[in-house]
Amino acid sequence: MILPVQRWYEAIFVRKSRRNFLNDDISHDSLIQLEKVCTELNSSILGARAVVVNQDPSEVFKGIVGSYGSIIGAPAYVAFIGDMDDANVQEKTGYLGEGVILEATALSLATCWVGGFFKEETVAGQIEIGSNEKVLSVTPIGYVKEEYSFQEKLMSRMVSSKKRKDLNVLLPEQSSHNLEDWQKRALEAARLSPSAINRQPWRFSVGDGYIKVSMDTPKDTKGISRRLDCGIAMLHLELGAMSSGVKGSWEYLTDPGVAIYKI
């Protein structure tokens, strides 16, 4: 798939996690466009796929969703499914899923990454899941009021969802003052990536013509993979680089490294 760089790059800066929806049906054109993007991403990223499920997801999100509170009123959702035989399934699912979420954002749809606190068996009853596949995460999709609900404000404060680590923290062995322009733009985009309980597990190192993505620790939190979070950051990083006119490619690494972007 040819990434819609400017469209998704702009969406990075307006995307917010939302949990209270208006329960209005999603427009036909928006659903068709979102399904089209899922199809294109599924074809280009082997080992992960996304499926738009246009039906009431209340049973999928029934009850309290971890630290994030209830998901209320969403008319549909997207399931992010990984091939567990793929060594890089978590990174690929995060990367692909964030592409879907940024496209939804560009379509004026609200989303919220949910991993570990949803009913996987309910999802499996609504879509076809292969024997080697697992639903790794989901997102509700729909329309929301511009203002946050009281619950959303409360939960946002509880998980400090608006706080992002300083770039100097994310570059533990280097100074952010010596970056090339494309590297700074890429890392600033990656810094804004969503992650489980806003843990921001990605760490970066830079060199001549590359940026390396690693995890802060291999230990996962609440059963949600840090590598999936890093996959989300990988897409943000790539969009930042490409918005500067710099195109590269990803090479996957092993723990604690995740991947390296080379131009």
Image (spheres, rainbow, N blue to C red):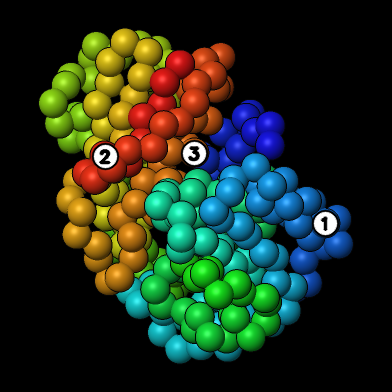
Quarter-of-image position of residue 31:
bottom right
Calculate the distance from the C-alpha at mark 1 to the C-alpha at mark 2: 37 Å
Q: Which residue is mark 1?
A: 32
Residue type pointed to by label 3? Leu
Residue 35, how many percent across, how many down?
76, 57
Calculate the distance from the C-alpha at mark 3 to the C-alpha at mark 1: 23 Å
Residue 146, how many percent across, how many down?
60, 59
Q: Element type at marker 2?
A: strand
Q: Is residue 116 left or right of residue 215?
A: right
- At 31% across and 29% down in the image, what residue appears? 212
Q: Is residue 260 left or right of residue 70?
A: left
First of labels 3, 1 by sequence position? 1
Residue 239, how many percent across, how many down?
53, 30
- At 58% across and 49% down in the image, what residue appears? 46
Q: Which residue is mark 3?
A: 235
Q: Which residue is mark 2?
A: 257
Residue type pointed to by label 1? Ile
Q: Element type at marker 3?
A: helix
Q: Is residue 200 left or right of residue 182?
A: left
- At 40% across and 52% down in the image, what residue appears? 87
Q: Is residue 227 left or right of residue 53?
A: left
Between residues 110 and 242, which one lies in front from this camera angle?
Answer: 242
Q: Looking at the image, is mark 3 or mark 2 nearer the viewer? A: 2
Residue type pointed to by label 2? Gly
First of labels 1, 2 by sequence position? 1
Q: Quadrant of the N terminus?
A: top right
How many residues crowd mark 3 within 10 Å: few (<14), some (14–19), many (20+)?
A: many
**Looking at the picture, does residue 169 appear above or below residue 69?**
above
Q: Element type at marker 1?
A: helix
Q: Quadrant of the C terminus?
A: top left
Residue 83, how many percent across, how many down?
51, 61
